Image (cartoon, helix red, strand yellow):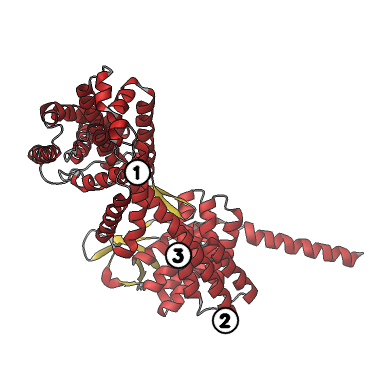
Amino acid sequence: MSKIFQMHCFRAFVLVAILFLTYAPSSSFAQTDLAGTIDRFGSSRGFGQTETLVNELAATGDDAAVPALKALAAGDLYTRKSDGKVFITRKGSSSRDLLLIDPVTGEEAGELSKRDLDKVKVNNNLRSTIDAALAGMTLMSPNRGTRLSAAQSLLKAPSEDNLILIEQAFEKEEDGEVASVLAQARAVSVLNSDRSPEEKAEAISDIADIGGREAISILLSARSSVGPDLQDEIDAAQAKIEKRLAFWDLAQNVWYGLSLGSVLLLAAIGLAITFGVMGVINMAHGEMVMIGAYCTFMVQQIIRTAYPHLFDWSLAIALPVAFIVTAAVGLVIERGVIRFLYGRPLETLLATWGVSLILQQAVRTIFGPTNREVGNPSWMSGSFDLGGLMITWSRLWIVLFSLAVFAALLLLMKRSAFGLQMRAVTQNRRMAASMGIRTPWVDAFTFALGSGVAGLAGVALSQIDNVSPNLGQSYIIDSFMVVVFGGVGNLWGTFVGAFSLGILNKFLEPYAGAVLGKILVLVFIILFIQKRPRGLFALKGRAVEA
């Protein structure tokens, strides 16, 4: 009985001692131990010993070690020659002196000449180790951005020493993006460790599931650190990733095509209205787009100067301004020039081309020939990932905006009295006139509407293209191609034509280049209209058929 009692007493004593050693030491004891480890940097011989000390500091998990590690990476850690004590240094009162700061307490310890100090040397490999160590110590931070940055640092500098810490952080991580990076970091660290082939095979599978171009780089770099038994697994994982990337590259090209198509739709939809109803080849249509972009610039300038808090609303304010201004300019052009040239297509083409040159020069005179800055509101800045797609907010909003404009015009054409008159004039002008429709005013307001829509296109294009006097020239030929391909005067034809040509352009560019790709598209359209002169969606009517 006494022996059992003595045994229990001994166990209790050991337990108390362990608890004391674990929890009871005062902060001063911990600081002393940490300071002793830091002071060993002064006596380290070679980068290998320094790296060992870095890992020791990281293993403590003590935040008090962070300043010393950061100073070491920055080259600001020095040893005092007289006693071998290590300090963090800052610039002193003179160029020859350095201010000494205790690496643990942060207290200043006076100034000392550089001659009385030795710098703790580091190289690039050691800096990578330090970054990984600092990352490992910040994985448990309550700040999401800090944890994400730490996980990314560990991914770039895999180390077996941080593997346990990464696994612990991964189990506790609730944020999806941070957890994904941690999973990659764990897998990479496992491949660079001495763990069993089974665990390495599982890590290869995890990397394949994560995917991405970075995963291929990871697998290629891991070939030398894994045995020959795992080479087949790496090849299979690489093939799986490449197959998935090929799919997402295809999807990305489709998205780029849709994005370009939305731009072409915005630029061409107004031209489709004027060309279809009036039969006028308006070479000044691109300048309406340019005027809309400069309206956006002017609105933003006023807001920046007088109402900076409204900047995020600048595009919403610029839209009606651009529409009204460009519609007014279009109305003046139609009433002042074009109405005298109906039935004379060559003279109309030359006249509108002259108007385009006049408008370009006027803008150059007022605003100068250089590009003007048009800022992006906060809700149009940045990008996000959707699966394997990278989608910018500016492009996404332009796609949605172009669809909204198309829907509004479709509703106007189908459900309004003005739209009915436009369709009547388009199908049979003489019959429409005999029914009492004032065709000259329909022409005027149609031209104004088409110009106003071009102004809306300018507002959108100001977010993705340079705002300059030549802005409209970049889209006028493409706009005509869209209108001719889709069918003159048909909105649905313009819609299908814009997105079809946009996707076709983006699929040709990787193989033929941007310029040759456009030439091939033009050749395709020329061949297409030989078979279907009226485009994809030909208008029907007595005058049209005649």
Q: Quadrant of residue 373?
A: top left
Which of the two labelled residues, at mark 2 and mark 1, occupies the earlier sequence position?
Answer: 2
Image location (x, y in percent) of residue 537: 36, 41
Left or right of residue 162, residue 93 in this image: left
- Seen from this angle, which residue lies furthest front? 546
The Cα atoms of the two marked residues, 2 and 1, are separated by 51 Å
- Seen from this angle, which residue lies furthest top? 436
Residue at the image position 45 percent from the left and 66 percent from the top: 156
> From the viewer's perspective, is residue 100 above or below residue 40?
above
The Cα atoms of the two marked residues, 3 and 2, are separated by 23 Å
Report which residue position mark 2 lands on: 227
Which of the two labelled residues, at mark 3 and mark 1, occupies the earlier sequence position?
Answer: 3
The residue type indicated by label 2 comes to: Gly
The residue type indicated by label 1 comes to: Ser
The residue type indicated by label 3 comes to: Arg
Q: Pointers 3 and 2 in contact (CB under 8 A)?
A: no
Report which residue position mark 3 lands on: 213
Image location (x, y in percent) of residue 484: 28, 44
Q: Nearer the viewer, mark 3 or mark 1?
A: 1
- Seen from this angle, which residue lies furthest bottom? 228
| Circle 2 Cα neighbour tier, 10 Å, few/some/many (<14 / 14–19 / ≥20) | few
Residue at the image position 27 percent from the left and 47 percent from the top: 481
The Cα atoms of the two marked residues, 3 and 1, are separated by 29 Å
Left or right of residue 445, residue 142 in this image: right
Residue at the image position 50 percent from the left and 80 percent from the top: 224
Image location (x, y in percent) of residue 261: 34, 46
Residue at the image position 55 percent from the left and 70 percent from the top: 237
- Give the structural element (helix, strand or loop) at label 3: helix
Report which residue position mark 1 lands on: 262
- Give the structural element (helix, strand or loop) at label 2: loop
Which of the two labelled residues, at mark 3 and mark 2, occupies the earlier sequence position?
Answer: 3
